[in-house]
Image (cartoon, coloured by chain):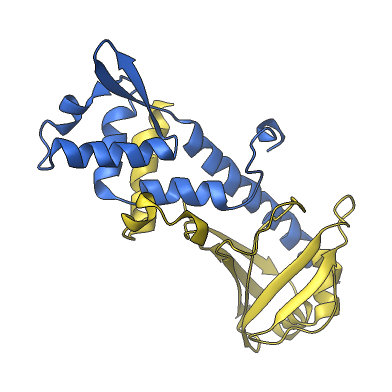
Amino acid sequence: MENRIEKRIELKAPISRVWRALTDYREFGEWFLVKLEGPFVPGQVTRGHITYPGYEHLKWEAVVQKMEPERLFSFTWHPYSVDPKNDYSKETPTLVEFRLEETPGGTLLVLTESGFDKIPSQRRDEAYRMNEGGWSEQMKNIERYVTPKR
Amino acid sequence: MSHRSDSRRGLGPRAPAHVFAALGDETRLLLVRKLCGGKPRSISQLTAGSRLTRQAITKHLRVLESARIVRCVRAGRESLFQFNPQPMEELKDYLDFVSEQWDRTLARLKSFVEI
């Protein structure tokens, strides 16, 4: 059990092509299935709505963090905020990073989403004050202890 | 996650965050380790062998209880604490769900750029 997600995928396309698919808001929308209102700009919010069948009523919103050409594209968002009645804006967002590396066959894309352990501000109770980092190791520990006994 | 659709927290990150936070402490991990075998234990049993006071252990148990990782059961005049695997399973379900969504999204990216 980890508090972050990492995906590695080999794409048979040049790094420049992948970069464009990631950072051109129209191209991004094509495969991410979202219709965005405007381009990605670091430090700014990008809004749109989901075009995935059945989820068209949902808004999409992310704050662009970094755009280092053909290397790193990152944004923060509220993952899978699928309940329109819930106000997710007060919750700590997760960080999504797309890292690119050139390979002989094309491009290696490493996606990470991290911060699932972050503390929503409305829940600053004892549990959170007592929390003192060291996450990944602890999650590995807990998995070791708990999983085999299920 | 449809089998968890009764959860009032839905798929928001709030519930996992609470569980993650409750587990983010060495003492509480140790308590979980002692309890995850399934046998309920008393505060005295859980304090034995620890350098912490009964009060400190109780405080940690309450944090775990608030995240539903343990529950308090009464046995006569004694309070026993019992491990509840559900929140951690939910946490795993949540990450599996997010992970699966990314698999689909990246597969679409792949077919989009590999023309």
The part of the image, by quadrant, that contains residue A129 is bottom left
Quarter containing the C terminus of chain A? top left
Residue at (45%, 45%) from the top-left corner? B19
Residue at (47%, 54%) from the top-left corner? A123
Q: Nearer the viewer, residue A113 or A125?
A: A125
Locate residue A91, reporting x and y percent.
58, 61
Q: Going by the image, does B12 lie left or right of B26?
A: right
Locate residue B15, reporting x and y percent.
54, 46
Which chain does yellow denote in the image? A
The part of the image, by quadrant, that contains residue A35 is bottom right
How many marks the image carries: the answer is 0
Q: Going by the image, does A148 lie left or right of B42?
A: right
Locate residue A69, reporting x and y percent.
65, 89
Q: Is residue B56 above or below residue A23?
A: above
Instruction: For residue A105, say whether it is visible.
Output: no
Q: Is residue A69 above or below residue A132?
A: below
Which chain does blue denote in the image? B
Instruction: For residue A38, say whether it is visible.
Output: yes
Residue at (75%, 60%) from the top-left corner? B105
Q: Going by the image, does A42 lie left or right of B49?
A: right
Q: Is residue B57 above or below residue A74?
A: above
